[in-house]
Image (cartoon, rainbow, N blue to C red):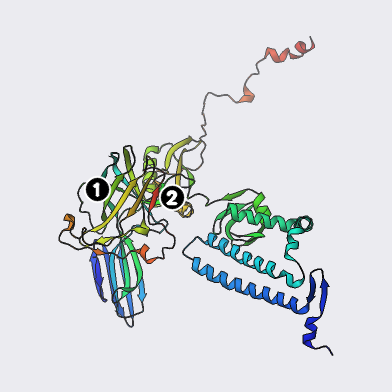
Amino acid sequence: MITNLDLLDIGLPTLDGTVTLGSVLKFILILSFSILLAKILSLYLRRSLKDRVSKDMAETIIKVFYYGMLTIVFLSNVSLIGIDPSAFLVAGGVTGIILGFASQNIVGNLVSGFFLMVERPIKIGDQVQISDVSGYVTDIRIISTHIRTFEGLLVRIPNQQVFTTNITNIVGHPVRRFEYTIRIRYSDDANAAIWLIKDIIDKEPFALLNPSPSVFVSDLGESSVNISVRIWAPVNEWFGIKTRILWNIKQALEENGIEIPLPQRIIRIQTDFQKVPEELKPVKEIESILNYEERVLS
Amino acid sequence: MYGHYNPPFSVEQEGIVISVTKIGEQWIYRRTLGTDNVEKIILGDEKRLIINPVEPLNTPKEITPNLLIEFEKILLLAAGAKRKIFLTFPIEIGVFIADKGDKNLQLLDVLSLVRQKFTLYGEVSNGVICKHWKSQIYSISPSPNPLQEGVIELTLRNASSDWASISKVVFSAYGMKLYYAGDVFTRARMDILNKNTAETGFELQYLSGELKSSPLKDFKTRKEAFGVYSLQKLGFAPLKFYMGWGF
């Protein structure tokens, strides 16, 4: 009669010995316990790193710790299921080729994910544009990068695509510039308008002193004098300032009698009382027309 | 205005009105400055409020821990020289709530009476954003309005072998310690390492001995102010600032 304990001893012969159901269960148990322990330790690590390092740096440290721990546990216990860890080294080349062909995309994404973590063109929390997706980076995983679009949608982009495409990091530098074109009438004083705009910029705390803002007449348009306004602001504040300053400029200009003109076209109608209607005019004989045929034929 | 207050109380100075009143079982904190009003409910008894100067980096929004003070005139310091100058710096007024004995300190409110402006120190690609302030250079301690400005006693050391032309100094607020009595005072240093680089930092020692008996405040003992940055966990935040893009 076979008992439960005997069942655990039933084994399959391998090159390195016999793999029993017990050893497989032991391997699964160790791996499960390791995953649980790695998760708990990651949680503890996340708590202790909070306020000490930046969020993206903390996430990278945690991921390296988590997957590193699991890899070590897996390799040190893989013999329980009849696999010799040294075989990984021996068969590494062949396995690599096979795996490469079988899982090109996964390995490609994995390698890209590794390089993304090392090169760090983007960080968690950055505002980025990758291909045609714009938004905040919420997570950089080993296979994919998660973006929360400005509309609040979650977009998962494979790391291979992230790594090989153009990335625009909107917050890659500490400051950025934005620009307006303010149109005023030709009858308005452009110097006064420039002074008013500069005064508004000066009162805005986040409009940086250095790099200095510039306000100048950039174009004499069809129906307006165009004033260019260029302002530098901290990357995390620029959008709020941009909307705020534009409205303040409009209000200040209007309060001082400077108006933003509508497109206009001046039409001059010339009244000539001596003018005779065309149909009553005697047709002049124009030699060039009259003799045209003759000239062509000759 | 600076000091410790036991609720209920009301204090008013230079357009700032701060009060704590009891309505039923709740304490109501109210602060008015121009059109800006703040009202908070406090649940808890036996608390007291502390109003003192804090680092000038919290309003209108905390976006940087760095303060850049631009000099009105360029200062030239000879090679190997060590000199003391006085500068002014902006002050923010912090309102804290604490248990008796100033334990369990919590920031309640921060306000400012001075002009707010930011600037970039360094390059667009890798510079740092700083709160900006322009100051004259004084050889003796000035007496500005303590609700608006404080005084920095800055020790300049030129360790290089060339003249140093100084137009600005940048500090990290993580090391800033403010002391107040009738004025607001702090001590800092700027070590010029070479033509383009310098290191700055605040003096962390408590006011005792030498400074207490300083002729500047020979009869007063200043109190150490609670800072907003000192409430935060410092982690790996550097207390010194390395000025690598010139001064």
Is any atom of residue A248 visible in this view? yes
The image quarter containing residue A287 is top right
Is any atom of residue B57 visible in this view? no
Residue at 21% of width from left, 58% of height from top? B210
What's the mark number on residue B114?
none
Question: Disc 2 marks which residue?
Answer: B128
Depth check, front residue: A206 or A52: A52
Secondary structure beneath dot 1 equals strand
Task: Mark 1 vs mark 2: tell me if same chain.
Answer: yes
Q: CA distance from mark 1 to mark 2?
A: 27 Å
Counting from the top left corner in percent of width and height, residue A113 is at 64, 56
Q: Is residue A202 left or right of residue A140?
A: left
Quarter placement of the C terminus of chain A: top right
Residue at 33% of width from left, 43% of height from top? B159
Q: Amino acid at mark 2?
A: Val
Question: Disc 1 marks which residue?
Answer: B84
Check disc 1: other Cα within 10 Å, few if <14, some if 14-19, many if 20+.
some
Asked if residue B122 is positioned above or below residue B64 in the image, the reply reads: above
